[in-house]
Amino acid sequence: MRAVVQRCREARVTVDGRVVGETGRGLCVLLGVAATDTEEDAVYLADKTAHLRIFPDAEGKMNLSLLDLKAAGRAGEGPAADVLVVSQFTLYGDCRRGRRPSYAAAAPPEQAEGLYLRYVRELESRGLKVATGEFQAMMVVEIANDGPVTILLDSQKQF
């Protein structure tokens, strides 16, 4: 399972011109699921995401997680969600051969949706409010990246 985690001031997803998910200050996560992923990958990655120390402390050092901000009452400025999670199978696009990406490593939709939802539930179980995109829809994702801070996570620890 792979995640592109962006610290954001705000983020939103629209489908056919309607907003389906949004967040204010918090995280926007683009999430890809591999065919080899299991529920353990979803649990691991959700825990890593929730505890990722990429928010500034009083001295401006990236030392706080989103959970730390929530505990201090400083998260969730803007729309109610703390995290916006958007499914993105293209994170498993392999461009090493030729010019057209291969998505052979990506999970089939039925498997991917279940693990995507497990990841969301795991974040919620840690006390985070989570908004989502619409699985398998053509979405427009707008992200106001704060910093910019972008972190890549992989449950198989490939990077």
Image (spheres, rainbow, N blue to C red):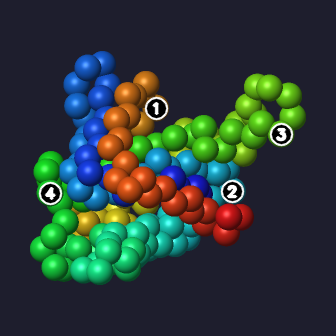
Precedes in sequence: disc 2 or disc 4:
2
Precedes in sequence: disc 3 or disc 1:
3
Residue 77: mark = 4
- Residue 71 lies, with reference to residue 81, above or below; the image says below
> Label 3: which residue?
96
In what quadrant of the picture does the N terminus appear?
Answer: bottom right
In what quadrant of the picture does the C terminus appear?
Answer: bottom right
Kind of residue at disc 3: Arg
- Residue 39 lies, with reference to residue 133, above or below; the image says below
Residue 147 or 36: which is nearer the viewer? 147
> What kind of element bears circle 4?
loop
Q: Are marks 3 and 1 in contact (CB under 8 Å)?
A: no
Mark in front: 2 vs 3: 3
Q: Residue furthest front?
A: 59
Q: How many marks?
A: 4
Q: Residue at x 56, y 62 (%)?
A: 153
- Residue 71 lies, with reference to residue 83, above or below; the image says below
x%, y% of residue 70? 20, 73
> Label 1: which residue?
136
> What kind of element bears circle 1?
loop
Marks 3 and 1, how far apart in space?
A: 25 Å
x%, y% of residue 62? 39, 74
Residue count near mark 4 (Cα–Cα under 10 Å), binned few <14, some 14–19, many ≥20? some
Q: Residue at x 22, y 25 (%)?
A: 18
- Residue 114: in sight, yes or no? no
Residue 36: mark = 2
Marks 4 and 1, how far apart in space?
A: 29 Å
Residue count near mark 3 (Cα–Cα under 10 Å), binned few <14, some 14–19, many ≥20? few
